Amino acid sequence: MTGPSGPVILSSMENLESYARERFELNRQKQTLKEQQQQRLTVTYNGGLFRVDMTLLNYLYMKNANAGLFNQSTKCILPDSYDTPIEIDCVELVELCDARWNEVHNDWYNQFQELKTKRRAGDVEV
Amino acid sequence: MKSRGVLILYSESNQLDYKRLADLCARLAEYYLKVPVTIIKLTPKKKGRRVFKYENLELVTTEWNNGGRYSAYDLSPYDETLLIDADYLIQNDNLANYFGSDHDFLCHNKSWDVTGLDQLNIDESMSYNKFKMRWATVVYFKKSQHAKNIFRMWEKVADDYEYYSKLIGFALAPFRNDFCLSIAHQVCSGYCNTDTFSHDLPSMTTVNKLIDYGNKNWLIWYSYRNKENVIRYSGDLHVMNKRCILETDLYDKLWNSV
Protein backbone atom coordinates (compact mmCIF):
# COMPACT_ATOMS: atom_id res chain seq x y z
CA MET A 1 0.00 0.00 0.00
CA THR A 2 1.41 3.38 -0.96
CA GLY A 3 0.60 6.65 0.72
CA PRO A 4 1.22 10.23 -0.40
CA SER A 5 4.59 10.27 1.39
CA GLY A 6 5.69 6.79 0.34
CA PRO A 7 4.87 3.26 1.46
CA VAL A 8 2.49 2.92 4.38
CA ILE A 9 3.50 0.52 7.13
CA LEU A 10 0.16 -0.73 8.31
CA SER A 11 1.46 -1.99 11.63
CA SER A 12 2.50 1.50 12.70
CA MET A 13 -0.41 3.46 14.11
CA GLU A 14 1.55 6.68 13.79
CA ASN A 15 1.98 6.21 10.05
CA LEU A 16 -1.62 5.24 9.63
CA GLU A 17 -2.71 8.35 11.43
CA SER A 18 -0.50 10.54 9.31
CA TYR A 19 -1.70 8.75 6.15
CA ALA A 20 -5.32 9.31 7.17
CA ARG A 21 -4.60 12.97 7.87
CA GLU A 22 -2.98 13.46 4.49
CA ARG A 23 -5.91 11.80 2.72
CA PHE A 24 -8.28 13.97 4.72
CA GLU A 25 -6.43 17.14 3.71
CA LEU A 26 -6.28 16.07 0.07
CA ASN A 27 -10.02 15.48 0.05
CA ARG A 28 -10.59 18.87 1.66
CA GLN A 29 -8.46 20.58 -1.00
CA LYS A 30 -10.27 18.61 -3.69
CA GLN A 31 -13.64 19.71 -2.35
CA THR A 32 -12.58 23.37 -2.24
CA LEU A 33 -11.30 23.09 -5.80
CA LYS A 34 -14.63 21.64 -6.88
CA GLU A 35 -16.62 24.40 -5.18
CA GLN A 36 -14.47 27.18 -6.60
CA GLN A 37 -14.77 25.82 -10.13
CA GLN A 38 -18.47 25.02 -9.95
CA GLN A 39 -19.42 28.55 -8.99
CA ARG A 40 -18.03 29.62 -12.37
CA LEU A 41 -20.33 27.26 -14.27
CA THR A 42 -23.03 29.78 -15.10
CA VAL A 43 -23.95 31.71 -18.22
CA THR A 44 -26.44 34.49 -18.81
CA TYR A 45 -28.65 34.37 -21.85
CA ASN A 46 -31.67 36.46 -22.78
CA GLY A 47 -32.11 37.73 -19.22
CA GLY A 48 -31.90 34.25 -17.71
CA LEU A 49 -29.10 32.66 -15.74
CA PHE A 50 -28.28 29.07 -16.57
CA ARG A 51 -26.16 26.67 -14.57
CA VAL A 52 -24.08 24.72 -17.05
CA ASP A 53 -24.33 21.04 -16.22
CA MET A 54 -24.39 17.79 -18.13
CA THR A 55 -28.19 17.71 -18.26
CA LEU A 56 -28.39 21.12 -19.91
CA LEU A 57 -25.56 20.32 -22.33
CA ASN A 58 -27.16 17.00 -23.26
CA TYR A 59 -30.50 18.61 -23.88
CA LEU A 60 -29.01 21.31 -26.07
CA TYR A 61 -26.91 18.86 -28.07
CA MET A 62 -29.95 16.65 -28.57
CA LYS A 63 -32.11 19.58 -29.70
CA ASN A 64 -29.44 20.65 -32.15
CA ALA A 65 -29.05 17.11 -33.48
CA ASN A 66 -32.82 16.82 -33.95
CA ALA A 67 -32.87 20.17 -35.70
CA GLY A 68 -30.25 18.94 -38.14
CA LEU A 69 -31.76 15.47 -38.66
CA PHE A 70 -35.47 16.17 -38.61
CA ASN A 71 -35.66 19.88 -39.40
CA GLN A 72 -37.01 20.65 -35.95
CA SER A 73 -36.80 24.20 -34.60
CA THR A 74 -33.76 25.23 -32.60
CA LYS A 75 -35.90 27.63 -30.60
CA CYS A 76 -37.57 26.54 -27.40
CA ILE A 77 -38.45 27.64 -23.88
CA LEU A 78 -36.25 26.49 -21.01
CA PRO A 79 -36.53 27.32 -17.31
CA ASP A 80 -33.32 28.93 -16.02
CA SER A 81 -31.71 28.35 -12.59
CA TYR A 82 -34.40 30.51 -11.02
CA ASP A 83 -37.24 28.62 -12.73
CA THR A 84 -37.98 31.57 -14.96
CA PRO A 85 -39.00 30.41 -18.42
CA ILE A 86 -36.63 31.86 -21.00
CA GLU A 87 -36.91 31.74 -24.77
CA ILE A 88 -33.69 30.31 -26.13
CA ASP A 89 -32.01 29.43 -29.35
CA CYS A 90 -30.27 26.11 -28.77
CA VAL A 91 -27.45 26.87 -31.20
CA GLU A 92 -26.55 30.12 -29.47
CA LEU A 93 -26.89 28.76 -25.95
CA VAL A 94 -24.92 25.59 -26.59
CA GLU A 95 -22.02 27.68 -27.88
CA LEU A 96 -21.98 29.74 -24.70
CA CYS A 97 -22.36 26.71 -22.44
CA ASP A 98 -19.75 24.67 -24.27
CA ALA A 99 -17.20 27.48 -24.06
CA ARG A 100 -17.80 27.98 -20.33
CA TRP A 101 -17.76 24.22 -19.64
CA ASN A 102 -14.41 23.77 -21.39
CA GLU A 103 -12.84 26.83 -19.80
CA VAL A 104 -13.81 25.79 -16.27
CA HIS A 105 -13.00 22.10 -16.68
CA ASN A 106 -9.60 22.79 -18.22
CA ASP A 107 -8.71 24.97 -15.22
CA TRP A 108 -10.12 22.38 -12.85
CA TYR A 109 -8.11 19.60 -14.48
CA ASN A 110 -4.85 21.55 -14.48
CA GLN A 111 -5.22 22.61 -10.87
CA PHE A 112 -6.11 19.11 -9.77
CA GLN A 113 -3.09 17.62 -11.53
CA GLU A 114 -0.92 20.07 -9.65
CA LEU A 115 -2.68 19.43 -6.37
CA LYS A 116 -2.09 15.67 -6.60
CA THR A 117 1.65 16.18 -6.39
CA LYS A 118 1.55 18.62 -3.45
CA ARG A 119 0.18 17.11 -0.35
CA ARG A 120 2.24 18.67 2.39
CA ALA A 121 1.39 22.15 3.57
CA GLY A 122 4.89 23.40 2.80
CA ASP A 123 4.66 22.32 -0.84
CA VAL A 124 1.57 24.37 -1.62
CA GLU A 125 2.27 27.76 -3.10
CA VAL A 126 0.37 30.40 -5.08
CA MET B 1 -28.76 51.23 -22.06
CA LYS B 2 -29.17 51.06 -18.32
CA SER B 3 -26.26 52.23 -16.22
CA ARG B 4 -24.43 49.55 -14.25
CA GLY B 5 -21.90 49.84 -11.50
CA VAL B 6 -20.51 48.76 -8.18
CA LEU B 7 -21.23 50.60 -4.95
CA ILE B 8 -18.99 50.29 -1.91
CA LEU B 9 -20.12 51.81 1.38
CA TYR B 10 -17.76 52.05 4.31
CA SER B 11 -17.47 53.70 7.70
CA GLU B 12 -14.31 54.64 9.50
CA SER B 13 -12.96 52.66 12.40
CA ASN B 14 -10.12 53.42 14.78
CA GLN B 15 -8.63 49.96 14.43
CA LEU B 16 -8.90 49.23 10.73
CA ASP B 17 -8.36 51.46 7.72
CA TYR B 18 -11.59 50.76 5.86
CA LYS B 19 -10.93 53.53 3.34
CA ARG B 20 -7.77 51.77 2.20
CA LEU B 21 -9.60 48.47 2.02
CA ALA B 22 -12.44 50.05 0.03
CA ASP B 23 -9.91 51.48 -2.46
CA LEU B 24 -8.46 48.03 -3.03
CA CYS B 25 -11.89 46.48 -3.32
CA ALA B 26 -12.87 49.13 -5.88
CA ARG B 27 -9.74 48.62 -7.93
CA LEU B 28 -10.33 44.88 -8.18
CA ALA B 29 -14.05 45.26 -8.92
CA GLU B 30 -13.41 47.79 -11.67
CA TYR B 31 -10.80 45.56 -13.28
CA TYR B 32 -12.66 42.26 -13.19
CA LEU B 33 -16.26 43.41 -13.69
CA LYS B 34 -15.44 46.21 -16.13
CA VAL B 35 -17.98 48.62 -14.66
CA PRO B 36 -17.51 51.92 -12.81
CA VAL B 37 -17.22 51.87 -9.03
CA THR B 38 -18.52 54.42 -6.53
CA ILE B 39 -17.16 54.56 -2.98
CA ILE B 40 -19.20 56.40 -0.40
CA LYS B 41 -18.27 57.02 3.20
CA LEU B 42 -21.11 56.64 5.69
CA THR B 43 -21.28 58.28 9.06
CA PRO B 44 -23.32 56.00 11.28
CA LYS B 45 -25.77 57.44 13.80
CA LYS B 46 -24.24 55.43 16.61
CA LYS B 47 -20.98 53.54 17.00
CA GLY B 48 -20.92 49.84 17.70
CA ARG B 49 -18.32 47.33 18.87
CA ARG B 50 -17.67 43.74 18.01
CA VAL B 51 -15.27 41.14 19.37
CA PHE B 52 -13.27 39.18 16.80
CA LYS B 53 -11.27 36.05 17.43
CA TYR B 54 -8.13 35.99 15.34
CA GLU B 55 -5.86 33.20 14.09
CA ASN B 56 -3.70 33.27 17.23
CA LEU B 57 -6.92 32.93 19.26
CA GLU B 58 -6.48 36.53 20.39
CA LEU B 59 -9.78 38.29 21.13
CA VAL B 60 -9.87 41.86 19.84
CA THR B 61 -12.65 44.36 20.38
CA THR B 62 -13.06 46.46 17.28
CA GLU B 63 -15.17 49.44 16.40
CA TRP B 64 -18.03 48.12 14.29
CA ASN B 65 -19.77 50.91 12.43
CA ASN B 66 -21.87 49.21 9.83
CA GLY B 67 -25.16 51.05 10.10
CA GLY B 68 -26.77 52.90 7.21
CA ARG B 69 -26.27 50.38 4.45
CA TYR B 70 -29.99 50.51 3.73
CA SER B 71 -29.35 53.91 2.17
CA ALA B 72 -27.61 52.19 -0.75
CA TYR B 73 -30.78 52.32 -2.80
CA ASP B 74 -30.92 56.12 -2.64
CA LEU B 75 -27.16 56.61 -2.84
CA SER B 76 -26.54 54.45 -5.86
CA PRO B 77 -26.07 56.44 -9.07
CA TYR B 78 -26.72 53.34 -11.20
CA ASP B 79 -29.84 51.64 -12.57
CA GLU B 80 -28.30 48.28 -11.78
CA THR B 81 -26.04 48.13 -8.74
CA LEU B 82 -23.79 45.59 -7.18
CA LEU B 83 -23.42 46.62 -3.55
CA ILE B 84 -20.36 44.99 -2.02
CA ASP B 85 -18.59 45.14 1.31
CA ALA B 86 -15.10 46.60 1.38
CA ASP B 87 -13.74 43.22 2.49
CA TYR B 88 -15.17 41.33 -0.48
CA LEU B 89 -12.32 41.01 -2.96
CA ILE B 90 -13.32 40.21 -6.51
CA GLN B 91 -11.14 37.92 -8.60
CA ASN B 92 -13.28 37.01 -11.61
CA ASP B 93 -16.19 38.24 -13.73
CA ASN B 94 -18.74 35.87 -12.21
CA LEU B 95 -20.87 38.63 -10.70
CA ALA B 96 -21.01 40.50 -14.00
CA ASN B 97 -23.37 37.73 -15.15
CA TYR B 98 -26.12 39.23 -13.04
CA PHE B 99 -26.14 42.59 -14.81
CA GLY B 100 -28.97 42.54 -17.31
CA SER B 101 -30.74 39.64 -15.64
CA ASP B 102 -34.47 39.66 -14.84
CA HIS B 103 -33.93 39.96 -11.09
CA ASP B 104 -34.75 43.04 -9.06
CA PHE B 105 -32.85 42.06 -5.95
CA LEU B 106 -30.41 39.27 -5.11
CA CYS B 107 -28.29 38.40 -2.10
CA HIS B 108 -26.57 35.31 -0.74
CA ASN B 109 -28.51 32.88 1.42
CA LYS B 110 -25.50 30.76 2.26
CA SER B 111 -21.87 31.32 2.97
CA TRP B 112 -19.21 28.65 2.53
CA ASP B 113 -15.91 28.42 4.26
CA VAL B 114 -13.23 28.09 1.57
CA THR B 115 -10.95 26.15 3.92
CA GLY B 116 -13.52 23.37 4.01
CA LEU B 117 -13.71 23.52 7.82
CA ASP B 118 -17.38 24.49 7.63
CA GLN B 119 -16.88 27.18 10.29
CA LEU B 120 -19.80 29.19 8.98
CA ASN B 121 -22.45 26.52 9.39
CA ILE B 122 -23.71 28.21 12.56
CA ASP B 123 -24.63 31.19 10.40
CA GLU B 124 -27.14 29.26 8.32
CA SER B 125 -29.79 30.57 10.64
CA MET B 126 -29.63 33.71 12.74
CA SER B 127 -31.65 32.70 15.76
CA TYR B 128 -32.45 29.71 17.93
CA ASN B 129 -35.76 29.31 16.15
CA LYS B 130 -33.87 28.82 12.86
CA PHE B 131 -34.79 32.04 11.09
CA LYS B 132 -32.93 31.69 7.81
CA MET B 133 -29.96 33.95 7.32
CA ARG B 134 -29.19 36.18 4.35
CA TRP B 135 -25.84 37.89 3.76
CA ALA B 136 -25.51 41.62 3.05
CA THR B 137 -21.91 41.24 1.81
CA VAL B 138 -22.89 41.21 -1.87
CA VAL B 139 -26.23 42.53 -3.00
CA TYR B 140 -27.43 43.04 -6.55
CA PHE B 141 -30.37 45.36 -7.09
CA LYS B 142 -32.16 47.26 -9.79
CA LYS B 143 -33.93 50.55 -9.31
CA SER B 144 -37.38 48.97 -8.99
CA GLN B 145 -40.31 48.94 -6.60
CA HIS B 146 -39.44 45.51 -5.23
CA ALA B 147 -35.84 46.47 -4.44
CA LYS B 148 -37.03 49.75 -2.95
CA ASN B 149 -39.44 47.88 -0.67
CA ILE B 150 -36.66 45.63 0.61
CA PHE B 151 -34.39 48.60 1.38
CA ARG B 152 -37.21 50.47 3.14
CA MET B 153 -37.96 47.40 5.23
CA TRP B 154 -34.22 47.01 5.93
CA GLU B 155 -34.19 50.57 7.26
CA LYS B 156 -37.24 49.90 9.40
CA VAL B 157 -35.66 46.80 10.93
CA ALA B 158 -32.44 48.74 11.61
CA ASP B 159 -34.41 51.51 13.33
CA ASP B 160 -36.38 49.05 15.46
CA TYR B 161 -33.51 46.60 15.92
CA GLU B 162 -34.27 45.91 19.58
CA TYR B 163 -37.89 45.03 18.83
CA TYR B 164 -36.92 42.63 16.04
CA SER B 165 -34.18 41.04 18.13
CA LYS B 166 -36.83 40.11 20.70
CA LEU B 167 -39.37 39.09 18.10
CA ILE B 168 -37.05 36.84 16.07
CA GLY B 169 -34.73 35.91 18.93
CA PHE B 170 -31.22 37.08 18.11
CA ALA B 171 -28.62 38.96 20.16
CA LEU B 172 -29.07 42.71 20.30
CA ALA B 173 -25.33 43.37 20.04
CA PRO B 174 -23.41 43.64 17.84
CA PHE B 175 -25.65 45.27 15.25
CA ARG B 176 -25.61 43.22 12.09
CA ASN B 177 -26.79 44.31 8.68
CA ASP B 178 -27.09 40.68 7.71
CA PHE B 179 -29.88 40.29 10.26
CA CYS B 180 -31.73 43.40 9.06
CA LEU B 181 -31.46 42.26 5.48
CA SER B 182 -32.52 38.72 6.40
CA ILE B 183 -35.76 39.95 7.94
CA ALA B 184 -36.47 42.48 5.19
CA HIS B 185 -35.67 40.02 2.45
CA GLN B 186 -37.75 37.23 3.92
CA VAL B 187 -40.75 39.47 4.52
CA CYS B 188 -40.60 41.00 1.04
CA SER B 189 -40.13 37.58 -0.59
CA GLY B 190 -43.12 36.11 1.21
CA TYR B 191 -40.79 33.95 3.35
CA CYS B 192 -39.74 32.00 0.25
CA ASN B 193 -36.20 31.09 -0.62
CA THR B 194 -36.14 33.26 -3.73
CA ASP B 195 -34.11 36.26 -4.87
CA THR B 196 -30.81 34.68 -3.89
CA PHE B 197 -27.60 34.16 -5.85
CA SER B 198 -27.14 30.76 -7.46
CA HIS B 199 -23.75 30.33 -5.78
CA ASP B 200 -22.74 30.52 -2.13
CA LEU B 201 -20.71 33.36 -0.64
CA PRO B 202 -17.03 32.29 -0.54
CA SER B 203 -15.68 33.37 2.84
CA MET B 204 -12.69 33.12 5.09
CA THR B 205 -13.25 33.58 8.83
CA THR B 206 -11.11 35.63 11.21
CA VAL B 207 -9.45 32.54 12.72
CA ASN B 208 -7.83 31.84 9.35
CA LYS B 209 -5.45 34.15 7.58
CA LEU B 210 -4.19 34.91 4.12
CA ILE B 211 -0.49 34.28 3.88
CA ASP B 212 0.19 34.83 0.19
CA TYR B 213 -1.34 35.90 -3.09
CA GLY B 214 -0.12 35.46 -6.66
CA ASN B 215 -1.32 34.33 -10.11
CA LYS B 216 -4.92 34.95 -8.95
CA ASN B 217 -4.49 32.38 -6.20
CA TRP B 218 -4.91 32.88 -2.49
CA LEU B 219 -2.87 30.89 -0.01
CA ILE B 220 -4.85 30.51 3.20
CA TRP B 221 -3.51 29.30 6.51
CA TYR B 222 -5.79 27.35 8.79
CA SER B 223 -5.53 25.13 11.79
CA TYR B 224 -7.49 21.95 12.35
CA ARG B 225 -7.18 19.89 15.53
CA ASN B 226 -3.97 21.73 16.41
CA LYS B 227 -2.39 20.88 13.06
CA GLU B 228 -1.49 23.80 10.82
CA ASN B 229 -2.15 23.61 7.12
CA VAL B 230 -2.61 25.76 4.04
CA ILE B 231 -5.10 25.66 1.22
CA ARG B 232 -4.88 27.27 -2.18
CA TYR B 233 -8.01 28.91 -3.49
CA SER B 234 -8.81 31.07 -6.48
CA GLY B 235 -11.89 33.22 -6.90
CA ASP B 236 -13.77 35.95 -5.10
CA LEU B 237 -13.23 36.00 -1.36
CA HIS B 238 -14.99 37.59 1.59
CA VAL B 239 -12.02 38.23 3.85
CA MET B 240 -13.32 38.53 7.39
CA ASN B 241 -9.78 38.71 8.75
CA LYS B 242 -9.06 42.19 7.39
CA ARG B 243 -5.90 42.57 9.46
CA CYS B 244 -4.03 40.01 7.37
CA ILE B 245 -4.45 42.23 4.31
CA LEU B 246 -4.06 45.66 5.83
CA GLU B 247 -1.08 44.82 8.01
CA THR B 248 1.01 42.81 5.55
CA ASP B 249 2.46 43.17 2.05
CA LEU B 250 -0.57 41.32 0.67
CA TYR B 251 -2.25 44.67 0.15
CA ASP B 252 0.43 45.75 -2.32
CA LYS B 253 0.45 42.35 -4.02
CA LEU B 254 -3.27 42.60 -4.61
CA TRP B 255 -3.07 46.23 -5.64
CA ASN B 256 -0.34 45.51 -8.18
CA SER B 257 -2.03 42.36 -9.49
CA VAL B 258 -4.32 44.33 -11.81
Image: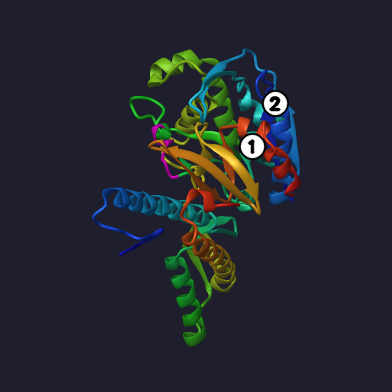
Eye-nearest disc, 2 or 1? 2
Label at residue B134: none
Residue B231 place in picture, x, y as percent: 51, 48
Which element carries disc 1, helix, strand or loop?
strand
Above or below residue B81? Residue A89 is below
Is residue B121 located in the magenta-colored stretch of the structure? yes
Which element carries disc 2, helix, strand or loop?
loop
Q: Residue under mark 1: which chain is it in?
A: B
In the rendered image, is residue B109 in sight? Answer: no
Is mark 2 in CB contact (under 8 Å) with mark 1?
Answer: no
**Depth check: B58 or B65 in front?**
B58
Please give the name of the residue rendered at 30% of the width and 64% of the height, measured from the top-left corner: A1
Residue A81 place in picture, x, y as percent: 47, 54
Magenta-colored span:
B116-122
Is residue A97 located in the magenta-colored stretch of the structure? no
Residue B165 place in picture, x, y as percent: 43, 17
**Label 2 Cα neighbours within 10 Å, binned few <14 / some 14-19 / many ≥20:** some
User: Which amino acid type is shown beneath numbered disc 1?
Assistant: Leu
Name the residue that disc number 1 marks. B83
User: Would you identify the image quadrant in which residue A88 lies?
Assistant: bottom right
**Most common SS among magenta residues:** loop
Q: Residue under mark 2: which chain is it in?
A: B
Name the residue that disc number 2 marks. B17
